[in-house]
Image (spheres, helix red, strand yellow):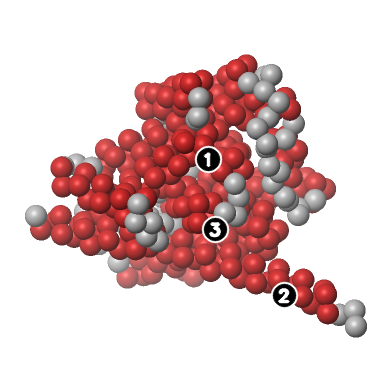
């Protein structure tokens, strides 16, 4: 019978997609601390524990997503899902990581408006968890991606630049400068066993996604003015915000404020209340769009806003990955990627200090908790969700000290 092998293959693909959904949902429920911390959680779960990609491929993917507009951590998750199981894998990775915080923020819109939870002890504990997670990621990536003097120098220079001139444009400039330095220092390096990211997406389809991305960016404002429909206006505002922002969720907030407050969709007070709630939930900060959509258009508005804010990220990752795979294995590009990988370590190190360290480690007792959590993660090798719970409990205890 000829139906056996295809069925087995489909079954295997379905189980892989289900595994991605399950693991990404766990991350969506436990990944506190913002986009930089998310990269640390991804590194721990996807790379260190499950080995779905090697360290270099992961660093290359992070570097690619730093170049693309949109929420970088979500794009990295989507990229890992695509590498693992194609488009369905990418969608499963996005859905699992996004849905928990989106649902939580929609509930916040209905139940917890104006609640003062930003200063709760468990929130402070989760910030300390994020610092420990990122420190672990910096240590692991640094050992593999900055093994010599030149790469350590690039990483330290990237750290200094990111701290002295903090902006999304600075990060792009750092990566560009590091690629030039890497090209210069390693132009005669034949390569270090560069692995190839296996992408099941064809280049024609990828090019179509890029064309669709730009077409929507140009067409939605015209449709908004022509048809004067609320849902198109919502989709246009959130799609444009997701398509034109560099630097992740926090940079997205002022863009969203200009879209929803002057139009009267959401009041300034409700906007700030939702922002406070967004700090209390795991997952990508861009799901704040779900809260704003719910405030302006109920459940339908929440769905429209959430899809619109992430659609540019999905289209760009799908469109760029097949071409990136060819570029990263090209001999002339290898040296540039060596420099970029070192710069990614430096950017992560800068983020470990600011905003994570400066907002989480405020007293000796905070440092003591961070050290305990780091030991639990690195030497006891406990799952991240256990460390998250321990950090939250520790934050509550600190509040009573």
In this rendering, the answer to whether 266 lies above or below 109 is above
User: Would residue 328 be visible to someone looking at this image?
Assistant: yes
Q: State the residue at coordinates (41%, 27%).
A: 159
Question: Where in the figure is residue 341, as x and y percent of width and height?
Answer: 55, 33
Q: Is residue 67 above or below residue 97?
A: above
Which is closer to the viewer, label 2 or label 3?
3
Q: Secondary structure at mark 2?
A: helix
Q: Earlier in the sequence, mark 2 or mark 3?
A: 2
Q: Which residue is mark 3?
A: 50
Camera-near label (2 vs 1) is 2
Residue 207 pos. (x, y %): 78, 45
Q: Which residue is mark 1?
A: 245
Marks 2 and 3 in Cβ contact (< 8 Å): no
Side of 117 relative to 397 (left or right): right
Q: Earlier in the sequence, mark 2 or mark 1?
A: 2
Q: Quadrant of residue 327?
A: top right
Density class for disc 1 (Cα within 10 Å; few <14, some 14-19, many ≥20) is some
Q: Which residue is mark 2?
A: 11
The CA distance from mark 2 to mark 1 is 39 Å
State left or right for residue 134 relative to residue 154: left
Image coordinates for residue 369, horizontal then vertical, percent: 22, 50
For this rendering, which residue is in front, 236 or 195?
Answer: 195
User: Contact (CB < 8 A) between labels 2 and 1?
Assistant: no
In this rendered view, identify the residue nearer to me: 178 or 34.
178
Left or right of 247? Residue 53 is right
Q: Residue at x 80, y 46 (%)?
A: 203
Residue most extreme to the right: 1
Q: Nearer the viewer, mark 3 or mark 1?
A: 3
Between discs 3 and 1, the one toward the N terminus:
3
Q: CA distance from mark 2 to mark 3?
A: 20 Å
Task: Tell me the element at label 3.
Answer: loop
């Amino acid at each position: 019978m000829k139906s056996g092998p295809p069925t087995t293959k489909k079954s295997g693909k379905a189980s892989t997609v289900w595994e991605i959904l399950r693991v990404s949902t766990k991350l969506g429920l436990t990944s506190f601390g913002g986009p930089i911390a998310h990269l640390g959680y991804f590194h721990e779960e996807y790379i260190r524990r499950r080995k779905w990609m090697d360290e270099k491929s992961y660093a290359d993917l992070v570097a690619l997503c730093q170049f693309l507009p949109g929420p970088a951590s979500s794009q990295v998750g989507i990229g890992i899902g695509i590498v693992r199981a194609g488009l369905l894998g990418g969608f499963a990775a996005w859905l699992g990581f996004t849905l928990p915080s989106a649902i939580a923020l929609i509930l916040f819109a209905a139940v917890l408006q104006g609640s003062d939870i930003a200063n709760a002890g468990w929130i402070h504990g989760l910030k300390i968890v994020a610092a420990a997670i990122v420190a672990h990621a910096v240590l692991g990536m640094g050992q593999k991606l900055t093994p010599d003097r030149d790469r350590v120098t690039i990483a330290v220079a990237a750290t200094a630049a990111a701290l002295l001139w903090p902006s999304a444009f600075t990060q792009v400039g750092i990566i560009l400068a590091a690629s030039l330095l890497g090209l210069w220092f390693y132009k005669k390096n034949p390569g270090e066993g560069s692995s190839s990211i296996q992408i099941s997406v064809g280049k024609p389809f990828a090019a179509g996604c890029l064309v669709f991305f730009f077409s929507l960016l140009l067409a939605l404002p015209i449709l908004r003015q022509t048809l004067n429909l609320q849902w198109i206006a919502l989709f246009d505002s959130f799609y444009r915000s997701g398509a034109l922002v560099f630097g992740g969720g926090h940079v997205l907030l002022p863009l969203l404020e200009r879209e929803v407050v002057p139009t009267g969709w959401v009041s300034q007070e409700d906007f700030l209340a939702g922002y406070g709630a967004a700090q209390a939930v795991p997952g990508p900060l861009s799901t704040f769009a779900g809260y704003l959509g719910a405030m302006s258009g109920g459940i339908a508005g929440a769905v429209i806003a959430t899809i619109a804010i992430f659609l540019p990220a999905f289209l760009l990752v799908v469109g760029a990955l097949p071409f990136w795979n060819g570029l990263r294995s090209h001999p002339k590009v290898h040296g540039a990627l060596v420099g970029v990988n070192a710069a990614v370590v430096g950017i992560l190190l800068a983020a470990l200090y600011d905003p994570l360290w400066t907002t989480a480690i405020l007293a000796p007792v905070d440092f003591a908790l961070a050290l305990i959590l780091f030991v639990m993660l690195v030497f006891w090798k406990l799952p991240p969700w256990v460390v998250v719970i321990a950090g939250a409990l520790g934050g509550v205890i600190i509040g009573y000290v």
